Image (tube, helix red, strand yellow):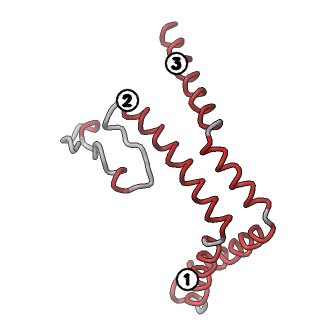
Amino acid sequence: MMDTTATQIDVVEQANNIADMVTSSDVFDEYKQAKANLRDDKQVMEKIAQFQTLKEKYEEVQRFGKYHPDFDSISKEVREKKRELDTYPLVAEFKRAEKELDELLTDISQKIAYAVSPFIKVPTGNPFFDQAGCSGGCGSGGSCGCS
């Protein structure tokens, strides 16, 4: 029992080391800077607040769907404001930095999972890769659908 506990402590310590490496990486620094730039820009924060308000209206309209009298106009306005927000330079830079950090974390997660077993599923956000590996069966008593 003592060996198992010591091994578990070592694994957690190594996980903490990996977390420290991520938070001291250039990718993480770029993400933090992009997030700070976004937060410090009054114009973009105002646009985000306006979009949130519009999104709440959209969610209300969605409850009734196409039968709501404002469905078409609100849906169109949400799409336009989202496009406008997404193309704002600071938002685009933040999304790029966020995507790079997400890719780094996904790579790390996959390396750890696949070191344990090639059949462990790691959500990647990419449907092609999320379907890779084992697709049920083996672990639940059914036939194996592993690729």
The residue that mark 2 highlights is 115
Element assignment for label 2: helix
Distance Cα–Cα, label 2 vs label 1: 48 Å
Q: Please tell me whether residue 145 is drawn above or below residue 3 in the rendered image.
A: below
Is residue 41 toward the left or the right of residue 98 in the image?
A: right
Residue shown at the point (78%, 71%) measured from the top left: 43
Q: Nearer the viewer, mark 2 or mark 1?
A: 2
Marks counted in the figure total 3
Q: Quadrant of the C terminus?
A: top left
Q: Tag 2 or tag 3, which sits nearer the N-term? A: 3
Crowdedness near tag 1: few (<14), some (14–19) or many (≥20) residues, C-alpha within 10 Å: few
Residue kind at label 3, given as amino acid type? Gln
| Discs 3/2, front | 2
Q: Is residue 62 above or below residue 86?
A: below
- SS of the residue at dot 3? helix
Write down the residue under mark 1.
64
For label 3, the crowd category at 10 Å Cα-Cα, with few meaning under 14, some 14 to 19 and many 20 or more, is: few
Of residues 25 and 146, the one nearer the viewer is 25
Q: Quadrant of residue 111?
A: top left
- Quick check: 132 left or right of 38? left
Q: Mark 1 and mark 3: span between their CA atoms?
A: 52 Å
Cβ atoms under marks 3 and 2 closer than 8 Å = no
Task: From the image, tell me which residue sits under label 3.
Answer: 8
